Amino acid sequence: MKLFTAVWLVLRGTLHVFGGYFTIRFRFSRLSRIEREACVVDWARGLLRIWRIDLEVRGAPPSHGPVLLVSNHISWLDIVVIHAARYCRFVSKADIKAWPLIGALATGAGTLYITRESRRDALRTVHRMADALKAGEVLAVFPEGTTSNGLALLPFHANLLQAAISSGAPVQPMALQFVDKVTGEISLAPCYVGDETLVGSIWRTLTTPGIRAVVSFGEPQLPELRERREWAGELRQAVDALRTY
């Protein structure tokens, strides 16, 4: 029965993903920015419903920009969960843009891409982020730079914080957790770390009796007189403090 249920959820989720692709491909050009953002939020919430993942939002998501959200990074599911809680534009590694289907969804949702190995491209991305923040947008980054198992935080990289310092935009810490709805304990099912495969992580997630995604928003911090490396450490502490369930 568990196998049948998981296969059924995979099929429904796949159809939902293709539905999102066709919305971006054929409808987005006729929609306003606000309508496109609402579509992204509705799509993300729809996928969570299909895959029986509850959403719990703690604290106050930003009502408007400019603001840079900084979050811990656990899973491929993080972006869907954050979009379900509050639309934002993510900053992601450039190779995602070339992924079949996923790249089109990410681009349609407004993702900014960065080539981490290139200092020149990183500087270009910081300038684009600063421009977006000056235009009043909500951006989101994962300053750990990669996924972890969610039990402990990796060090926060400081480079992308320069966009908030340059634009004068506040930075709001945000924490993600996945909780087993049966036991109430932290769930490692959605983790996507190291040599784990995306398929394996999705399969674990769908064969778990139930998961609750918890998104906790902290208080925004202004960049006035901040040094970015020191600020990265302070934001890491703020995100860690939000990870209490």
Image (cartoon, grey):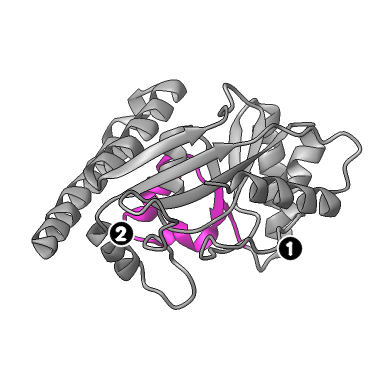
Nearer to us in this view, 49 or 163? 49
In the rendered image, the residue lying farthest to the right is 225
Few, some or many residues within 10 Å of mark 1 (<14, 14–19, 20+): few
Q: Residue at x 65, y 55 (%)?
A: 143
Q: Residue at x 41, y 58 (%)?
A: 187
Q: Position of residue 74 (x, y in %)?
A: 50, 58
Q: Is mark 2 on a helix, strand or loop?
A: helix
Question: Which segment is the magenta one?
Answer: 91-115
In the rendered image, residue 106 lying in the magenta stretch gets the answer yes
Question: Vertical placement of 194 versus 45: above or below?
Answer: below
Q: Where is residue 62 in the image (x, y as percent from the top left)?
A: 59, 27
- Horizontal side, residue 83 vs residue 69: left or right: left
In the rendered image, residue 69 lying in the magenta stretch gets the answer no
Disc 2 target residue: 205
Asked if one can make out residue 112 in the rendered structure from this viewpoint, the answer is no
The dot on residue 119 is 1
Q: What residue type is labelled 2?
A: Thr
Q: What residue type is labelled 1?
A: Arg
Which image quadrant: the N terminus? bottom left
Question: Vertical placement of 115 versus 32: above or below?
Answer: below
- Horizontal side, residue 216 vs residue 25: left or right: right
Question: Vertical placement of 61 versus 233: above or below?
Answer: above
Few, some or many residues within 10 Å of mark 2 (<14, 14–19, 20+): many
Nearer to us in this view, 185 or 172? 185
Nearer to us in this view, 211 or 130? 211
Circle nearer the N terminus (1, 2)? 1
The dot on residue 175 is none
- Horizontal side, residue 202 vs residue 58: left or right: left
Q: Which residue is drawn at 26% across and 64% down?
A: 203
Q: What element carries label 1?
A: helix
